[in-house]
């Protein structure tokens, strides 16, 4: 079983739609959680950190469920520019920090 | 915010030659940097953790003699792909964190290596 799992998609949604991605992690020593966005042939860029209490940044809402070991990302009012691959990233504290990337979920927003 | 500069952005080299990729933290000191490789339509795979002033820590399956890492200063780490072969063609990305714990990572812009 992979340490971080995501549905690869692709998710094809119309503009204005609400779309949600989930990501599960298996290591109970996972300490920090992030969502990154990666555009084609570009480096990943931090979209948002995920806090235990859940957090929102504009149209994006991230949530963490430690009991079930998953994090989620909700995108409201999708824009064409939201089309990208969304990477779930988990930082594990094993004495030193180790970062595990999910394989990513591809999102296509269409007009 | 934290900026990581990676150079070159792309490189084409002949089989058997070596290629050096540089990763610099521009506005912060990074005692630890990370090197990733990404094949098309796949996730980033951690190759190694670069530690300033000491040997790099390689992930299982990554040949340390083939992928030489040098982290001689707090702002520079280099990855040298030695005796490159076509199967080494990939997107190589470095990253660093300006802090520990809950902080995320900043990535370099990546280096697309093509070995012909």
Image: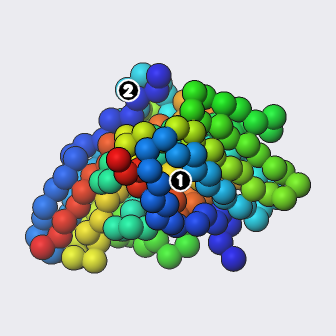
Rendered location of residue A61, percent (x, y): 65, 37
Tell me where residue A23 appears, x and y as whole percent: 66, 58
Q: Which residue lies most toward the right here?
A: A67
* Chain identity of mark 2: B
Q: Are marks 2 and 1 on the same chain?
A: no
How far apart are the two marked residues, 2 and 1, measured between alpha carbons? 25 Å
Q: Return the residue at label 1.
A: A87
| Residue A111 percent coordinates (x, y) | 35, 47
Determine if residue A22 is in view: yes
Residue at horizontal 42%, vertical 22%? Answer: B27
- Image marks 2 and 1: residues in contact by CB distance under 8 Å: no
SS category of the residue bearing label 2: loop
**Residue drawn at 46 percent across, 64 percent down:** A10
User: Residue B26 bears which disc, if any?
Assistant: 2
* Residue B27 to residue B20: above or below: above
Residue at image point 52% right, 67% down: A8
Q: Nearer the viewer, mark 2 or mark 1?
A: 1
**Residue at x 46% of width, y 26% of height:** B2
Image quadrant containing the C terminus of chain B: bottom left
Q: Secondary structure at mark 1?
A: strand
Circle 2 packing at 10 Å, graded few (<14), some (14-19), many (20+), is few
**Residue B16 versus residue A72: which sits nearer the camera?**
A72
């Amino acid at each position: 079983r992979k340490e971080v799992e995501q549905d690869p998609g692709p998710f094809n949604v119309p503009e204005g739609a609400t779309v949600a991605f989930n990501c599960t992690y298996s290591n109970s020593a996972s300490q920090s959680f992030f969502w990154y966005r990666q555009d084609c042939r570009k480096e990943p860029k931090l979209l948002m950190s995920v806090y235990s209490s859940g957090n929102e940044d504009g149209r994006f809402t991230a949530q963490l469920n430690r009991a079930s070991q998953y994090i989620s990302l909700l995108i409201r009012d999708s824009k064409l520019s939201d089309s990208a691959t969304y990477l779930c990233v988990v930082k594990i504290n094993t004495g030193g920090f180790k970062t595990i990337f999910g394989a990513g979920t591809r999102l296509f927003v269409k007009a | 915010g934290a900026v990581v500069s990676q150079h070159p952005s792309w490189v084409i080299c002949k089989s058997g030659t070596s290629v050096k990729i540089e990763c610099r933290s521009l506005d912060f000191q990074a005692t630890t940097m990370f090197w990733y490789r990404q094949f098309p339509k796949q996730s980033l795979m951690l190759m190694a953790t670069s530690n300033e002033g000491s040997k790099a820590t390689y992930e299982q399956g990554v040949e340390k003699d083939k992928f030489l890492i040098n982290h001689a200063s707090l702002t520079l780490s280099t990855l040298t792909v030695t005796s490159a072969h076509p199967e080494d063609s990939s997107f190589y990305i470095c990253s660093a964190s300006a802090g520990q714990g809950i902080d995320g990572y900043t990535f370099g812009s990546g280096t697309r290596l093509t070995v012909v």
